[in-house]
Image: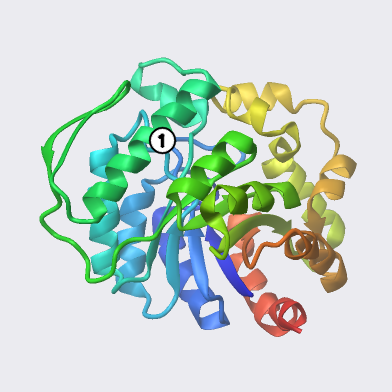
Amino acid sequence: MRFGYTLMCEQSRPDQLVRDARIAEAAGFEFATISDHFQPWLAAQGHSPYAWAVLGAVAQATERIELMTTVTCPILRYHPVVVAQKAATVQILSGNRFRLGLGAGERLNEHVIGRGWPSVGTRHRMLAEAVQIIRALLDGECVNFHGSHFDVDSARLWDLPDERVPIGIAASGPNACRLAGRYADVLVADEPKPELGELFDAAGGAGKPRVGLVALAYDEDRERAVRRAHEQFRWAGLGWKVNADLPNPDAFEGATKTVTPAQVAEWIACGPDVAEHVAKIRAFLDAGFDEIALLQIGADQQEQFTGWAERELLPALRA
């Protein structure tokens, strides 16, 4: 069982994210994940720096902590050839501490290039082609690829790391689980559903790591934690089918107008009670996840969170 820390680009400046990564490493987190958005879900979050530049800086600012994207979409905003090049570069800069997490994306981030927003079935087919291209490039092949959605003309990576970059795929349903089982080295999910792991195993993922993503709001004052979670994270209860199709922060604002702080407190563990947080995280352990990435809501609460996690939460989880 391993526990990670989330560098959330949507709530922090890039220089703070680098500082937070150093603090998380010192606190004993084994890995760090980073989100890759063009804009935040809600304006209250207030940020969205370029995740790959942050990764390069974090790779140089840390020594031990592993790094992972959760997740990068390689089908619209980025071409899969470019994603493979970025992943290989970060793997070299980090001394082989990087894993590439991929997903089918959200309209929030991908529509900005003006190519429209494909249906979920089309996105999964695009992701399948993208993963094949990325895998071949990371294996050192010279790639010529002509698919239904992507073309690649004699591409190869001229700087390959000593260790191949592991690939993770985010899944919330059967199609993505089957894709992950076939092509990925890691399953990534933000819901503690045992069936996701079962589908992943059946498609070829048996014995491979499963990373669960868990948001929380630590604060010595529980009501203050609930207010912060409601202000910045109330979109979490909409469900992935809704979240994937909303185009901008204004749309998320409108879609969450009726969400109450009490509802958010049911979805997300808030406050200082270690037992409450452990109970939420235990659902992922019971569902078969063996790595948990924790996301502390609130940019100005990161140092308080990592200190509390080092003293109380991580020892409780490891026990």
Q: In the shown orientation, is residue 34 left or right of residue 299?
A: left
Who's the residue at 81% across and 51% down the image?
226
Q: In the shown orientation, is residue 190 left or right of residue 63?
A: right
x and y percent of residue 94 in the render?
Answer: 30, 70
x and y percent of residue 79 in the render?
Answer: 28, 34
Q: In the shown orientation, is residue 93 left or right of residue 30?
A: left
- Is residue 174 at all visible to an observer of this figure? yes
Q: Is mark 1 on a helix, strand or loop?
A: helix
x and y percent of residue 145 in the render?
Answer: 21, 32
13 vs 315: above or below: above
Q: Write down the quadrant of residue 318 in the picture.
A: bottom right
Q: Write down the quadrant of residue 66 in the picture.
A: bottom left
| Residue that badge 1 annotates | 128
Who's the residue at 27% across and 27% down the image?
150
Q: Farthest right residue?
A: 262
118 vs 236: above or below: above
Q: Pointer 1: residues within 10 angstroms few (<14), some, or many (20+)?
A: some
x and y percent of residue 282 in the render?
Answer: 79, 65
Who's the residue at 46% across and 69% down the image?
21
Give, as a three-letter code, the residue at label 1: Ala
Image quadrant containing the N terminus: bottom right
- Compare residues 298 and 41 and report the one nearer the observer: 41
